[in-house]
Amino acid sequence: MRTSVTTPRLTLFTSPKPFRDPHIRVIQQNALASWRALGPEVDVILFGDEEGVAEVARTMGFRHQPHVARNRYGTPLLLDMFAQAQQMARSPWVAFLNADIILLPDTWDVLQALDRVSHPVLVSARRWDMDIVAPIDWAREDRNAWRTRARTHSLHPTGMDAFLFRRGQIQAMPPFAIGRAGWDNWMIYHARKQGWWVIDATPDWTLIHQKHHYGHLPQARPHFKQEESLENMRLAGGPARMYTLWEATHWLVRGQLRRRPWRKMQSWRVLELLLLRPGQPHKGLRRVLLRIVRRRWQRPWLAQPGWWLAYYGRGVVDDGEGER
């Protein structure tokens, strides 16, 4: 009897933290199980030989690549992971995600929209932060309700925990350390310089970030306070290249690509990037001007609850629609 083999449409890859800490173990298993729940058209590759990774890959039926280049601190390098993942992938689309990000079926809506686009694209989305402490059995969950529930929580203004692109598109990158600041900003900068469309898919793509501590890092300090983050920023080319989804060229809204509309706050962001150009951006007059600029656009927009409603528009990120 001949068995049919489903050709993957999407390859997801990541390098999980060790499954030693009880809370980290729970949220990573929740996330990885949500990827598996997307069905047989998803292929998942787990990188690294950290504690528990091989066992989880075996249990969930994922591919496992224990061998990955590392820096002098022992942290896996994204450059090697991206190269290996694109070589190993059997699908036209590839996505890197942090291992604590829950995916929902609207991932397929995003992919369907992208299949109609011929121009090179780099796709990301802002994440919805949720406190989750218990295991999730996705076979028993209503994922429509999860999409609606997530969009009542806080949307992180700069966090980018997923990047979706065509296989073979990213050929080279600096030797960034995973899980540290700076490399995700470089991805947006690099895409813009290459002339790719940078698509902010937040309105359509629900990325749920399960909040966690930083006990796995030296002195339990947040990733952006680590020496490796400073090294990542140096490799990226400095503060002037710390692009975010404020620099997206397009939005994906209800399956349709549209040019990112201009918002008043964008003027302040453009001025901020000009002040961050190579040189001495944090000294003298530039430092004073940077403080003024950031106070004018960051505080009014980001300190208020629901800033995303003013940015994207009501009914765009809070439409409450589930699986379509």
Image (tube, rainbow, N blue to C red):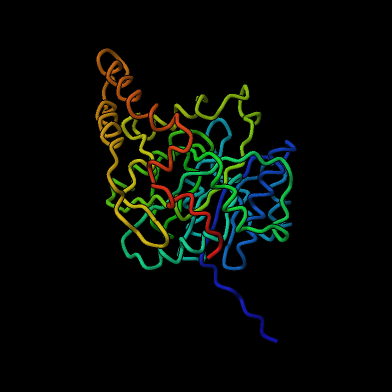
Q: Nearer the viewer, residue 9 or 55?
A: 9
Q: Residue furthest top?
A: 284
Q: Is residue 84 visible?
A: no
Vertically, is 91 above or below 299? below
Q: Quadrant of the N terminus?
A: bottom right
Q: Is residue 87 visible?
A: yes
Q: Nearer the viewer, residue 298 or 300?
A: 300
Vertically, is 299 above or below 125? above
In the rendered image, residue 154, in percent from the top left (x then y), is placed at: 53, 39
What count of labels does the image hold? 0
Q: State the residue at coordinates (33%, 19%).
A: 291
In the rendered image, residue 100, in percent from the top left (x then y), is placed at: 61, 44
Q: Residue furthest front?
A: 314
In the rendered image, residue 3, in percent from the top left (x then y), is placed at: 66, 81
Q: State the residue at coordinates (41%, 64%).
A: 113
Judged left or right of residue 215, residue 252 is left
In the rendered image, residue 125, in percent from the top left (x then y), is placed at: 45, 48
Vertically, is 73 above or below 165? above
Q: Which image quarter: residue 247? A: top left
Judged left or right of residue 273, residue 94 is right
Q: State the residue at coordinates (44%, 52%).
A: 315
Q: State the residue at coordinates (71%, 42%).
A: 25
